[in-house]
Amino acid sequence: MKRSTIAILTLALMVGLLLSACAGAQQAADAKDDSLKRIKQAGKFIVGLDDAFAPMGFRDENGNIVGFDVDLAKEAAKRLGVEVEFKPIDWDSKELELKNRKIDMIWNGLTITEERKKNMAFTKPYLVNTQIIIVPQGSTIKSKADLAGKKVGVQMSSSSLEALEKDKEVFESLAEVVQYPDNLEALLDLKAGRIDAVVADEILGRYYIEKRNENFVILEDNFGTEEYGVGLRLEDKELLEALDKVLDEMKQDGTMAEISKKWFGEDIIKK
């Protein structure tokens, strides 16, 4: 047999063994996915959230964590036969908290992005959101173009920041982008005149303006639409499947619509 033929056969054998090993490793990994069993045994799942993100998850006047996503998570836990624990986290460290198993999922107006999909799995989207521009009444800023030379506030590590950065023309024209731990701090600085505008989720912005009767204006221009989902670890496939199932049930039987009406006054659930 020629040496070239032997070399080819040897290479083919090595490739075959490598593919077999990879397939075996994947099967072993799949077999070890005890995410749903682990939750059942613990009797609860832990939700990481920014507790200043009204109306999705925030503290009421008594310090209790409440909100649209909070009610959704409670109902989902009930249907899974477990409890739910809410753990306020640093939003900038959310992916690390998930990876290190300090929390089981992120459920707090979490935007589904291609970048985030590299580090976490998402449920099916349940809400559509827009990245809006908020300015004080009487501001000379009437459009995105008017942001040139201005100081704009955003929450750090947020989809608002990502959306702003994607619009390179506007982003590069800004005098400064000021990043805050949460949107509330950004809006307080806007009220105090320390920044000129805030880019934030429409769901949060409209709720904040309405409830606090703030003299803010939402511009017609925006930085695009996006979808919310629940974020889990990539390997927690069984838990993801179970959660998707109960969320589908909540959509179909009208429970999710009722929770939406409670917080938004109307059904804004993504069908």
Image: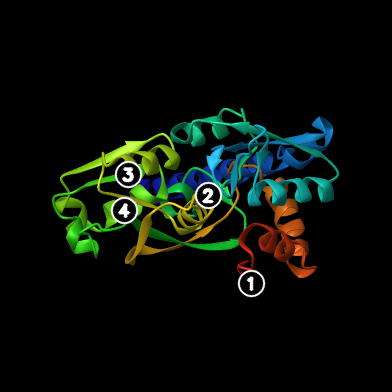
Location of residue 143 in the rendering, given as x and y in whole percent from the top left corner: 24, 65
Q: Quadrant of residue 151?
A: top left
Q: Nearer the viewer, mark 3 or mark 1?
A: 3
Label 2: how many Cα within 10 Å (few below 14, some 14–19, many 20+): many
Label 1: how many Cα within 10 Å (few below 14, some 14–19, many 20+): few
Q: Would you name the residue on which mark 1 appears?
A: 271
Q: Nearer the viewer, residue 210 or 127?
A: 210
Label number found at residue 190: 3
What type is the residue that disc 4 sits on? Pro
Label number found at residue 110: 2
The secondary structure type at the circle numbered 4 is strand
N-terminal-most mark, 1 or 2: 2
What type is the residue that disc 1 sits on? Lys
At horizontal 67% and vertical 33% (from top left) the residue drawn is: 62
Label 3 – label 2 distance at C-alpha:
23 Å
Label 3 – label 1 distance at C-alpha:
35 Å
Question: What sort of colour scheme is used for the picture?
Answer: rainbow
N-terminal-most mark, 3 or 2: 2
